[in-house]
Amino acid sequence: MKVISLANQKGGVGKTTVATNFPIFLSQQHKKRCLLIDLDPQANSTSYLLGSVPEKSFETLLLDDNADINEFIIPTEWGIDLVPSNISAANIELDLLGKYNRDRRLETRISDLKNSYDFVFIDTPPAVVGLLTVNALVASDEIYIICNTEKFALDGLVNLMRTIGQIRKEYRKDGLYFRCILNQFDRRRIIDRDIKSAVEELLGQLLCDSVIHENTDISKSFAVSKPLYFYNTSCSGYFDFSKLAKEVLDLYGREKGKAKEDIAAS
């Protein structure tokens, strides 16, 4: 079971678009069992997938010492499961301050899944220093930084990279890796091409080859709470997410192959 956080320190980068559609494409095209944990109190992912926001949310999951994550999972009609969020969780960080193991509570809850899924995705709030984000990063095997092509995109990327480095050191998670997904890209704009080149120079192979292009169908699909896979199979966004899903699965397939070779050689 691979646990992946989708993160950025600022809003407006299309993180919810990737957090919801990425696992759906893995599920529908590759038959992967996927769970999305909406850890953002704005609850945009929850609203998009369910059409409404239920009262039960991750807030109780993290605050109740006896909570079982399986009781918070809601199957969606789109082929993935969801642990929902709710705006009522906006003040949860204050409540977490007095809790034992406050920065590892999500990690503990996810361990109760016992490999029930191939992928667990975590949609994090737009912050890098809060307890929710720390809980997500500590619980993760890998982090996908969602980066758009706005002027200050590189600043947010560098700050989050610094935070990931601190998590590695403080929590002894040397195997915590990150990759970057470029989102909302429009090759017609000079600034988009410039930012893409800068990110490529900064990250090299840590930048996904697959790019999510600017696409009005993505916005339209949000307006009707219908994920892109089911909304329009001929738009560019559909093909972008198809490429991303295949790229990530191919990457993990190569990693598993290398691990087996290392074991055989030892």
Image: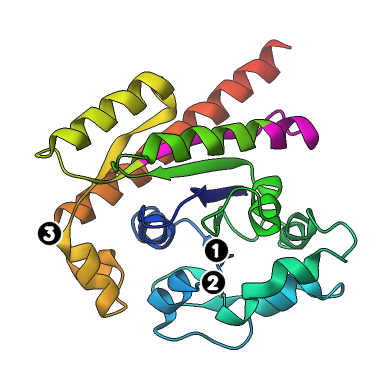
Give amino acid for label 1.
Leu
Q: Which is nearer the eye, 265 or 156?
A: 156
Disc 3 or 2, which lies upstream in sequence? Answer: 2
Q: Which residue is mark 2?
A: 82
Mark sitting earlier along the chain (1/3):
1
Which residue corresponds to mark 3?
234
Q: Amino acid at mark 3?
A: Ser
Badge 1 local density, few (<14 within 10 Å), some, or many (20+)?
many
Specify whether residue 22 is painted magenta: no
- The residue at which mark 1 appears reads as 35
Q: Which residues are magenta?
A: 166-181
The residue at the point 63 percent across, 37 percent down is 163
Give the Cα distance between marks 1 and 3: 26 Å
Q: Is residue 173 above or below residue 76?
A: above
Task: Give the SS element for disc 3.
Answer: loop
- Quadrant of the image occupied by residue 98: bottom right
Residue at 19 percent of width and 31 percent of height: 193
The reply to whether dot 1 and dot 2 touch (C-beta < 8 Å) is yes
Instruction: Tell me which amino acid carries mark 2.
Output: Leu
The span from disc 3 to disc 2 (Cα, nearest Å) is 26 Å
**Is 176 situated left or right of 8 in this image?**
right
In this rendering, position of residue 62 left or right of residue 40:
right
Rounded to the nearest angstrom, the CA distance separating label 1 from label 2 is 6 Å
Dot 3 alpha-carbon crowd within 10 angstroms: few under 14, some 14 to 19, many 20 or more: few
Q: Can you see residue 58?
A: no
Label placed on residue 196: none
Q: Quick one: label 2, few (<14), some, or many (20+) residues within 10 Å?
A: many
- Chain-order first, disc 1 or disc 2: 1
